Image (tube, helix red, strand yellow):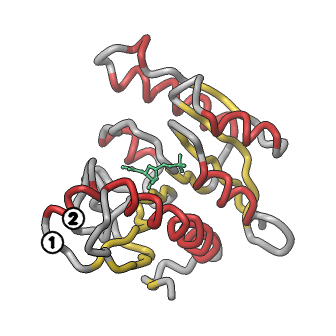
Amino acid sequence: MTKRVAILISGGGSNMVALADSMTGGHPARPCLVLSNNAGAGGLEKAAARGIPTAVVDHRPFGKDRPAFEAELTRVLDAAQPDIICFAGFMRVLTEGFVARWHGKMLNIHPSLLPKYRGLHTHARAIEAGDAQHGCTVHEVTPELDGGPILGQAELQILPDDTPESLAARVLPLEHRLYPEALRRFATGDRSRFTLT
Ligand code: GAR
């Protein structure tokens, strides 16, 4: 049966576009919802232009009450009945309660070669550390931030004159190849780890 995929975004949504555009033809999944915590997220228009239902759950009215924000997220997600939830640049930290609700169904893309550089400013941190390699990772979401089982990675070389910006600009196209491949495998039940070549 075709899997229903909800994609959560906070910004431009270029990974969401890559995922949505990959789910055609014989692909085992289809997008059912693009949800943002930010009404100004550029990705919302891109989703609507593709005929994908969109929703906004703004985190700001909830202040520090994360469980209340997540209860509203859950209500909107439940209505869309997703089999898989893809976090694609969704910049909110989630509580254990939320993560438990969707255990085994959530993927995230992170712009580093995990387990290196969980959290923010990954490109700057890789350069500062003098790393030769950098890249991106798709992993399952668990309560540990950026710490769930790794599904796939894509690597590149850091160049001597790379800046955080130039590195980010070279990692992003890799993300756009990695995430659709990881989703396709996951949707067929394949959780074995792969490296994009
Ligand atoms: C991507 O680089 C993604 O890996 C990163 O945000 C960007 C979103 O871009 N995610 C994180 O840093 C998560 N901690 P997009 O909106 O164009 O897909």
* Residue appearing at x 31%, y 56% in the figure: 164
Q: Within 10 angstroms of label 2, few (less than 14), some, or many (20 or more) residues?
A: many
Q: Residue furthest front?
A: 161
The circle drawn on residue 147 is none
Which residue does the numbered mark 2 point to in the structure image? 127
- Would you say 53 lies left or right of 185 here? right
Q: Residue furthest bottom?
A: 197
* Residue appearing at x 75%, y 64% in the figure: 23
Discs 2, 1 touching: Cβ within 8 Å: yes
Please, what is the three-letter code of the amino acid marked with disc 1? Answer: Gly
Among the 4 quarters of the image, the one containing residue 157: bottom left
Among the 4 quarters of the image, the one containing residue 140: bottom left
> Regarding mark 2 in the picture, which secondary structure is present there?
helix
Query: Residue 22 at what x, y percent from top left?
Result: 73, 66
* Residue appearing at x 73%, y 34% in the figure: 45
Quarter holding the N terminus is bottom right
Which residue does the numbered mark 1 point to in the structure image? 130
* Residue appearing at x 43%, y 29% in the figure: 70
Query: Residue 102 at what x, y percent from top left?
Result: 47, 49
Query: Residue 3 at what x, y percent from top left?
Result: 71, 61
- From this view, report whether residue 21 is shown above or below residue 77: below
**In the foreground, 107 or 135:** 135
> Regarding mark 1 in the picture, which secondary structure is present there?
loop
- Would you say 76 lies left or right of 170 here? right
